[in-house]
């Protein structure tokens, strides 16, 4: 049995700690296709991952769970909220980057059809009829600051998406997004960001998916 005991950040300034959690796996993840705002569901592995992250967080003092309103995120968040006994709130501003006309495409198809998305200023380039990573970072940062303002000196979870989580790291924490280009955010991994009362972010942990290691055994009654 593995439990997660968080080391809360303490200091003279009021801080809110947000666990940004990527949703569990979907069939589109396995096929390596861009999902964007498409409303896909967890596959069998994704549902197991959701139970594992819920079990890991069972002893955490999570005051509230927020989630993207897309089904794959909501299914993951429902497992967490049920296990920790916290209220669940859906927010459309926690959605994945909107990839517009590229929804459902593979990376190879994207490169062939929209090469500008792979230019040096890729993070500023909007997907056709969609968003840029910079747009997504601004949206996610505004959401994180609103959530933090509602939960001073508390721990909350926010279930979102891989591209959105990379974007909020860049915008809220100030990590150059070019350094995150090759970062893969694992399904149901935890990225910990503390937000102070002025809305400034501090990265405390990145892409933690210890609950998916082979030695972890979920409870039979979970």
Image: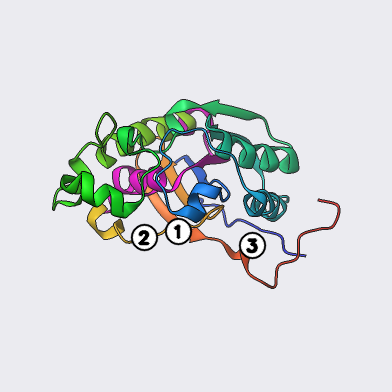
Q: Start and end of the magenta stretch?
A: 148-175
Whether residues under marks 1 and 3 lie with C-beta atoms below 8 angstroms apart, the answer is no
Which label sits in the foreground, 2 or 1? 2
Picture residue at 36% right of the left edge, 60% below the top: 183
Q: Earlier in the sequence, mark 2 or mark 1?
A: 2
Specify the label residue 92 is tagged with: none
Q: Which residue was labeled with disc 3?
A: 211
Q: Which residue was labeled with disc 1?
A: 206
Is disc 2 surrounded by few (<14), some (14 to 19) or many (20+) residues within 10 Å? some
Asked if the stretch drawn in magenta spans residue 166, the answer is yes
Whether residues under marks 2 and 1 lie with C-beta atoms below 8 angstroms apart, the answer is yes
Q: Which residue was labeled with disc 2?
A: 183
Q: Earlier in the sequence, mark 3 or mark 2?
A: 2
Q: SS at mark 1?
A: strand
Q: Position of residue 175 (x, y in %)?
A: 28, 53
- Is 17 located above or below residue 108 in the figure? above
Q: Position of residue 208 (x, y in %)?
A: 52, 61
- Distance CA(mark 2)–CA(mark 1): 10 Å
Picture residue at 35% right of the left edge, 34% below the top: 98
Image quadrant in which you'd find residue 180: bottom left
Question: Can the viewer see residue 171 in this picture?
Answer: yes
């Amino acid at each position: 049995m593995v439990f997660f005991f968080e080391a809360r950040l303490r200091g003279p300034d009021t801080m809110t700690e947000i666990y940004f959690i990527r949703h569990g796996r979907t069939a589109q993840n396995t096929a390596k296709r861009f999902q964007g705002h498409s409303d896909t569901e967890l596959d069998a592995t994704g549902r197991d991952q959701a139970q594992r992250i819920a079990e890991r967080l069972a002893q955490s003092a999570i005051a509230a769970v927020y989630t993207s309103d897309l089904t794959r995120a909501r299914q993951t968040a429902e497992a967490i909220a049920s296990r920790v006994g916290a209220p669940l709130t859906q927010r459309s501003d926690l959605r994945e980057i909107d990839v517009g006309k590229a929804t459902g495409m593979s990376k190879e198809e994207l490169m062939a059809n929209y090469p500008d998305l792979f230019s040096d200023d890729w993070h500023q380039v909007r997907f056709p009829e969609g968003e840029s990573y910079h747009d997504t970072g601004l949206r996610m940062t505004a959401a994180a600051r609103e959530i933090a303002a509602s939960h001073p000196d508390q721990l909350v979870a926010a279930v979102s998406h891989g591209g959105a989580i990379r974007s909020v790291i860049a915008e809220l924490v100030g990590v150059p997004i070019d350094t995150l280009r090759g970062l893969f955010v694992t399904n149901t991994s935890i990225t910990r960001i503390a937000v102070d009362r002025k809305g400034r972010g501090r990265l405390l942990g990145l892409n933690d998916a210890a609950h998916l290691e082979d030695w972890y055994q979920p409870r039979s009654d979970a």
